[in-house]
Image (cartoon, rainbow, N blue to C red):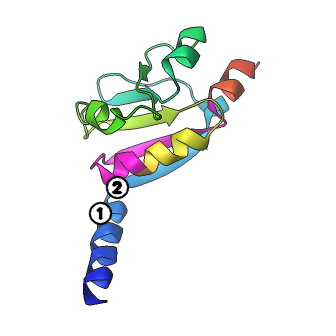
Amino acid sequence: MRNILLFVLIISGQLALAQMDSQPITEFKGFDDASELLLDVRTPEEYNVGSIDGAINIDWLSNKFNEKVAKLDKNKKVYVFCKKGGRSLKSQARLAELGFANVVDLQGGYDAYSNKN
């Protein structure tokens, strides 16, 4: 029981250090690639249909997701999106677990972004 409590406290502390935020993707105005990353976590097939300019595609469903994102700069702010919002929220939590300091979930996903007027 003691070990479980210690584990929960350590994980909670690590997640508290990471800044996790969200914003509607329809309000996304772009990013500065010198200090920020835009991560599209959809499948390559979805990505090839269309994406936001400058986005890096790393498929959340791939068994190499952790390995591929580990190569990214953990100190940069990361904006993450998917098709509708489910995979980006999950990947936001995973990125925080992997040590990314500032991760923003773009709510609504690419569908909302491509439909905005």
Residue 79 is one of the magenta-drawn residues: no
- Disc 1 residue crowd, few under 14, some 14–19, many 20+, Cα 10 Å: some
- Disc 2 residue crowd, few under 14, some 14–19, many 20+, Cα 10 Å: some
Magenta range:
94-109
Q: Position of residue 88 (x, y in %)?
A: 53, 39
Position of 4 relative to 90 (above/below)? below
- The residue pinned by badge 1 equals 14
Name the front one of labels 2 and 1.
1
Task: Tell me if 107 is positioned left or right of 64 in this view.
Answer: right
- The residue pinned by badge 2 equals 18
Instruction: Locate residue 78: give its quadrant.
Output: top left
Task: Tell me if 91 is positioned left or right of 95 in this view.
Answer: right
Q: Amino acid at mark 1?
A: Gln
Position of 18 relative to 52 (above/below)? below
Callout 1: helix, strand or loop? Answer: helix
Separation (CA) of disc 2 from disc 1? 7 Å
Position of 104 relative to 20 (above/below)? above
Position of 12 relative to 5 (above/below)? above
Q: Position of residue 21 (x, y in %)?
A: 49, 50
Q: Amino acid at mark 2?
A: Ala
Residue 106 is one of the magenta-drawn residues: yes
Check whether the beta carbons of the residues at disc 2 and disc 1 lie within 8 A of each other. yes
Q: Quadrant of the N terminus?
A: bottom left
Q: Quadrant of the C terminus?
A: top right
Between 61 and 29, the one lying in front of the other is: 61
Q: Residue at x 43, y 28 (%)?
A: 39
Q: Is residue 102 visible?
A: yes
Instruction: Locate residue 33: give its quadrant.
Output: top left
Q: Residue at x 26, y 40 (%)?
A: 74
Q: Residue at x 25, y 83 (%)?
A: 3
